[in-house]
Image (cartoon, grey):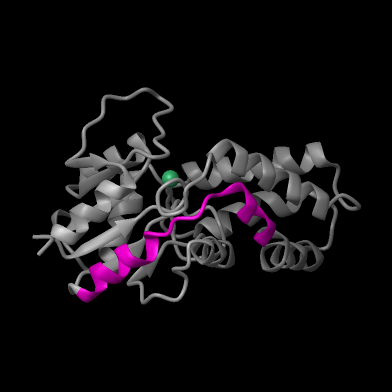
Amino acid sequence: MLEVILFDLDGTLVPMDLDYFTKSYMQALCTKFFDLIPPQKLVHEIWQGTYRIANDLDPGRTNKDVFWEYFLPKFSIDAEILISMFDDFYNQDFAQLKKTTKPNPDARSVIDTLLEKGYRVGIATNPIFPARAIEERLNWVGVADLPYSLVTTYEKMHYCKPHVEYYQEIVEMIDVCPERCLMVGNDVEEGLAARKLGMKTFLVEDCLLNTRNLNIKTDYRGSFAGLVEFIEELP
Ligand SMILES: [Mg+2]
């Protein structure tokens, strides 16, 4: 019996072409920091910092800690100035990236239905972004104000997908057996990792990602419209 439904964001709740989104995100960052940091250097160090977050399995450091410990010393810019400019970016500039995504008119009704049926709902987006950037993306599909049991931000989490530790940390945080969780996502590799822990998975295929061409093993799969039907039929 399911108890918790976890949703990925990019390409799942928020329809997007991830490459286009990422390119536009980097461009927007480069524009923001143009007077301060050469664009090539900025893009390089953001990727390097993200790579470190993605691979760090130290339970004592959050993803945010890992990023800034790497990123800050790369620039001879006052830490407070750099951090406040990033905050400013996520508070103001990040919103323009909505144009790289598509609307999802079913997102809200799907989550509403689950909450009405008594399920707990979590946003299990890869925690490489600050809470503000995640809230903004939730806003784009009109679901930022719903009562989630957990949103995996980079401030809070210590691991990334597809590490099984990421999913382990989620079940500990919200106190649930993995077998009672359904992970809804568009990425084959990330979904497989949830299955390693015993979670059920629903692969949403509208923006399917299978970069390593893995064999697809999932409990359920289909379009987002298929997910809507699946959730309507849940007890
Ligand atoms: Mg995704």
In the rendered structure, does residue 97 fall within the stretch colored magenta?
yes
Residue 154 lies in the magenta stretch = no
Q: Is residue 52 above or below residue 9?
A: above
Q: Residue at 33% x, 48% y: name it.
A: 224
**Does residue 164 appear left or right of residue 13 in this picture?**
left
Horizontally, residue 84 falls left or right of residue 156, namely right
Taking depth in this image into account, of 38 and 95 the one nearest to the observer is 95
Question: Which quarter of the figure has residue 9?
Answer: bottom left
Query: What residue is drawn where x is 35% and y is 41%?
Result: 190
Q: Quadrant of the C terminus?
A: bottom left
- State the extent of the magenta-drawn residues as a range: 95-116
Depth order, front residue of 125/80: 125
Q: Position of residue 181 (x, y in %)?
A: 20, 57
On the image, the x and y values in percent for residue 213 come to 36, 22
Residue 163 lies left or right of residue 171; in this view the side is right
The prevailing secondary structure element of the residues shown in magenta is helix
Q: Position of residue 1 (x, y in %)?
A: 8, 60
Residue drawn at x 53%, y 52% is 128
Which corner quadrant of the figure contains ligand 1? top left
| Horizontal arrangement in the rendering, residue 162 relative to residue 76 (left or right) | left
**In the rendering, at what x and y percent does residue 206 appear?**
38, 40
> Closer to the camera, 190 or 21?
21
Residue situated in front as seen by the camera: 146 or 141: 141
- The picture quadrant where one finds residue 182 is bottom left
Residue 5, located in which quarter of the rendered image? bottom left
- Tell me the residue at 79%/36% (across/down): 40
